[in-house]
Each structure stands twice: as C-alpha cells, then as structure tokens.
Image (cartoon, grey):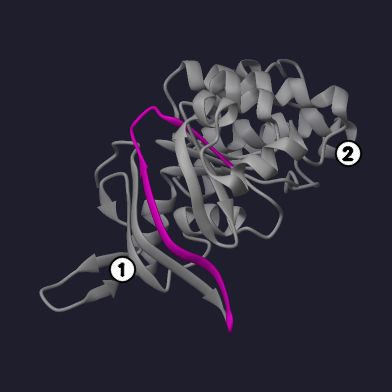
C-alpha cells in the first residue's frame, strides 16, 4: 500500500436517503499540507471527513487516499468494493480525532494510547507502553499515563485522543472540530499540539471554527455550504479577501 499522505477526490457525492449531503466534491491535498474546512453547520464538513476516513462510503465519484483508491479498486468495467480486511488496513494509516474524545473510560490514558497498536497491530505490550509514554509526553501529558479519562480535563482528554491516533503511525490526520467541546481556556492546549504536528509535516484535514488557527497554520482553506465547496484557496488569502459572496457573508459573521 502506498503511504504518501495525499488525498484526492473527484466528483464525490454522498446522500442519506433523499437528502444529498455532498455534491460534486473535488479535493486535492498534498503530502504535508494542512487544509482547514470551514462553513456553517450542516454544510457537509463532517461527512466529508467521515468519507475520507471510511466511516461512510461515497455514492459516486473517485476517492484516493495515500495514492490508492480508497474502499474500492478499479477493474476494466467498474469499481469494486475492497475486502473488509483491506479497508481496515487502509484505515490504519488515517488518524481521526472527533469533537467528543471517545476515550475508553475503563482504561488509563496510557492504556487508551496502547489499545490500537496492541489490539489491531499485534504489538507487544511492553513496546506499546514505551511508545505510549513517548506520545503522551509529546502532547504535554508526561506523567499522566496512569490517570483515567474522568480524572482529566477536556483539553487533556482530547490530547490523549490525539496521542491515541498517532500511536497507529498514520500518514494523514483528520480533525472534526476538535476544540468545539472544550472550555475556552483549554482550546489553546489542543491547538498547540496540532501546530506542532503541522510543523513536523503531518498531512492534516481539519474541520474547525478556529479562524486564528486556520490563518496561522493552514496552507489551504475550503469553505463549504449546502454540501458543496463554494471557495478554496490559500488560507490567508481566502480569509482576508474571499471572492465568493457566500464566503464573504459567512466570514463577516465569524471574524
């Protein structure tokens, strides 16, 4: 399997019953690129991430992640669904951090970070524990490995969730409004970890309301509305000089 940290989509469409959630989505994200996705609630941002991660399957179009057709393979006549084992293999190279932390409440922070490598990849517990300690330290939680989620603040829990995703050695990280459930004073803790990942060259697709983060860290920005990408371009350029009227109206409300 290729591991090049790229995402390419052409003509992606996704519906839930009669409701079309994504319409003709075209997407190009290069290795090491940080792309922020902004837009009003219900515009399809989270669904786009869930398609890239394989939590949802697209109805139409082409999606390539890490250089491979994602979830499907191409034959002379059609696209065929890959096996469940192959899809699971593809998904291990994509980390995802959600609004809610989704930590296992009966596991310590260290055990949460170890779970994927041990249960999915078959790593030895001693090896996984050492790596978990290193990852927790990298997100500013050295010494917190023995704490349970209920003993941690929201910002700390989200940083454990990031470390848990990184434990699988992903080539791409997806963030679905990772700071929206946090108290305002805890937001900076999580954004600092994300900035550090960006500096290290991680490919990141980030759904966010944090325009300051988008301006400071993102290479590119997508504005979505009603299931479509309305505007895309350099993050600072779009935020400072949006070309589309719908983008202008949205940014006037949030900036």
Residue found farthest to the bottom: 18
User: Does any portion of residue 136 appear in the rendered image?
Assistant: no
User: Does any portion of residue 24 appear in the rendered image?
Assistant: yes
Q: Main secondary structure of the magenta part?
A: strand
Looking at marks 1 and 2 on the same chain, the residue that comes earlier in the sequence is marked by 1
Regarding mark 1 in the picture, which secondary structure is present there? loop
Query: What residue do we see at 33% from left, 69% from top?
Result: 83
Query: Magenta span covers which residues?
Result: 17-37
Q: Is residue 18 above or below residue 130?
A: below
Q: Is residue 154 above or below residue 43?
A: above
Query: What residue do we see at 82% from left, 25% from top?
Result: 186
The quadrant in which residue 164 appears is top right
Q: Position of residue 18 (x, y in %)?
A: 58, 84
Q: Which residue is mark 2?
A: 150
Query: Which is nearer the eye, 225 or 174?
Result: 225
- Is residue 82 found left or right of 149 in the rendered image? left
Q: Which residue is mark 1?
A: 82
Q: Residues within 10 Å of mark 2 (few under 14, many from 20)?
A: few
Q: Position of residue 189 (x, y in %)?
A: 74, 21
Regarding mark 2 in the picture, which secondary structure is present there? helix
Query: Which is nearer the eye, 140 or 246?
Result: 246
Q: Position of residue 240 (x, y in %)?
A: 58, 25
Which image quarter holds the C terminus?
A: top right
Q: Is residue 113 above or below residue 57?
A: above
Query: Which is nearer the eye, 232 or 66?
Result: 232
Query: Which is nearer the eye, 10 or 158?
Result: 10
Query: What residue do we see at 33% from left, 40% from top?
Result: 6
């Amino acid at each position: 399997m290729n591991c090049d940290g790229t995402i390419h989509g052409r003509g992606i469409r996704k519906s839930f019953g009669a409701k079309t959630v994504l319409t003709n989505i075209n997407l190009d994200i290069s290795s090491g690129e940080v792309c922020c996705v902004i837009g009003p609630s219900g515009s399809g941002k989270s669904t786009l991430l869930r398609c890239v991660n394989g939590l949802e399957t697209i109805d139409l179009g082409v999606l390539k992640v890490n250089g491979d057709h994602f979830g499907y393979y191409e034959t002379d006549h059609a696209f065929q669904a890959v096996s469940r084992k192959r899809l699971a293999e593809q998904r291990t190279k994509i980390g995802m951090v959600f609004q809610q932390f989704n930590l296992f409440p009966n596991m310590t922070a260290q055990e949460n970070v170890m779970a994927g490598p041990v249960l999915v990849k078959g790593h030895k517990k001693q090896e996984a524990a050492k790596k978990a300690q290193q990852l927790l330290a990298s997100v500013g939680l050295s010494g917190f490995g023995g704490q349970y989620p209920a003993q941690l603040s929201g910002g700390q829990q989200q940083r454990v969730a990031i470390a848990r995703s990184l434990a699988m050695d992903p080539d791409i990280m997806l963030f679905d409004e990772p700071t929206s459930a946090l108290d305002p004073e805890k937001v900076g803790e999580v954004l600092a970890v994300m900035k550090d990942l960006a500096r290290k060259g991680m490919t990141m697709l980030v759904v966010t309301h944090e325009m300051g983060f988008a301006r400071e860290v993102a290479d590119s920005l997508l504005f979505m509305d009603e299931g479509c990408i309305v505007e895309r371009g350099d993050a600072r350029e779009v935020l400072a000089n949006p070309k589309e009227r719908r983008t202008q109206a949205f940014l006037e409300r949030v900036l």
